[in-house]
Image (spheres, rainbow, N blue to C red):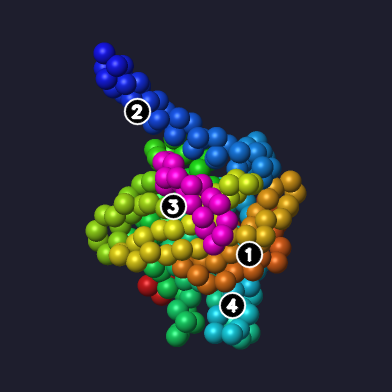
Amino acid sequence: MKNIKNLFVAAMMLAIVPAATAQNVDEIIGTYFENTGGMDAWKSLESLKMSASISQGGMEIPIEMYQTKEGKMSITANFQGMNMTFMAYDGETAWNTNQMTMAPEKLTQEQADNMKLQANDFPSPFMDYKSKGYTVEYVGEETMEGTPTHKIKLVQEPIMVNGKQEESITYYYFEAENFVPIATEVSMAGQTMKDTMSDYEEVDGLYFPFAMTMMGGMPLKIKSIEINPEIDAKMFSFPAEAAAKE
């Protein structure tokens, strides 16, 4: 009889654990939004402009990044006096500046399609993640470079890589004390890339990381952030003169 009772208790605990885990994930995400300005303020965000610099080959390269609620984006850089577009997307076409010819060129349709999937992710893929069809999973507590964190697995829509469909999985490390993400980890085409975020500062009531890495470790230092700036939509579009030559 005692063994039957123990089995019943164990079964009940197994049934409770998944629900408790899911609740903890939503609590962590909710606390993150609350601690960084509040969900209402984040949802009212229409666009962002970030002025920053990246360190590459011992050089500091000034860049500007624009993002909009519709998923449009632009990253431009001033390299040795020349303005270049690292990446731009207008909702349909993705393009950049060819570093050899300095001429604008379109990226592949696969790259554009993958960027279109990110249109729902401004300012964060965790915002209303359930309505987007995403899933989150609490992986556990983990120490990241000496800092206790909560590790969360985010699964988004599959993406295409070299003509093959791949799962889109990102692991986020939320600092256990302040519940802000301080690192991400993503695997793509057999490679794992890890990026970090730190030095959170307040901008018009919202908190953003001002030091981070991108593309697997490239240092990025944010100098200023503007909320809902005036934007010339032409910066996102493939130049008309280049399109006319196609």
- Asked which secondary structure carries label 4, the reply is strand
Quick check: marks 1 and 4 in contact, CB under 8 Å? no
Residue at the image point whose x is 58% and y is 50% from the top = 175
Between discs 1 and 4, the one toward the N terminus: 4
* Mark seen at residue 171: 3
* Residue span colored magenta: 136-154
Q: Can residue 192 be seen in this view?
A: yes
Determine the image quadrant of residue 222.
Answer: bottom right
Mark 2 — residue? Answer: 14
Q: Measure the C-alpha gap from mark 1 to mark 4.
A: 12 Å
Mark 4 — residue? Answer: 55
Q: Which amino acid does label 3 sit on?
A: Tyr
Between discs 4 and 2, the one toward the N terminus: 2
- Asked which secondary structure carries label 2, the reply is helix
Q: Which amino acid does label 1 sit on?
A: Ala
| Magenta stretch secondary structure, dominant | strand
Q: Residue 199 in the image: state x and y as whole percent.
A: 67, 60
* Mark 3 or 4, closer to the camera: 3
Quick check: marks 1 and 2 in contact, CB under 8 Å? no
Q: Measure the C-alpha gap from mark 4 to mark 2.
A: 49 Å
Mark 1 — residue? Answer: 211
Q: What residue type is labelled 4?
A: Ser
- The C terminus is located in which quarter? bottom left
* Mark 1 or 2, closer to the camera: 2
Residue at the image point whose x is 29% and y is 16% from the top = 2
- Asked which secondary structure carries label 1, the reply is strand
Determine the image quadrant of residue 232.
Answer: bottom right
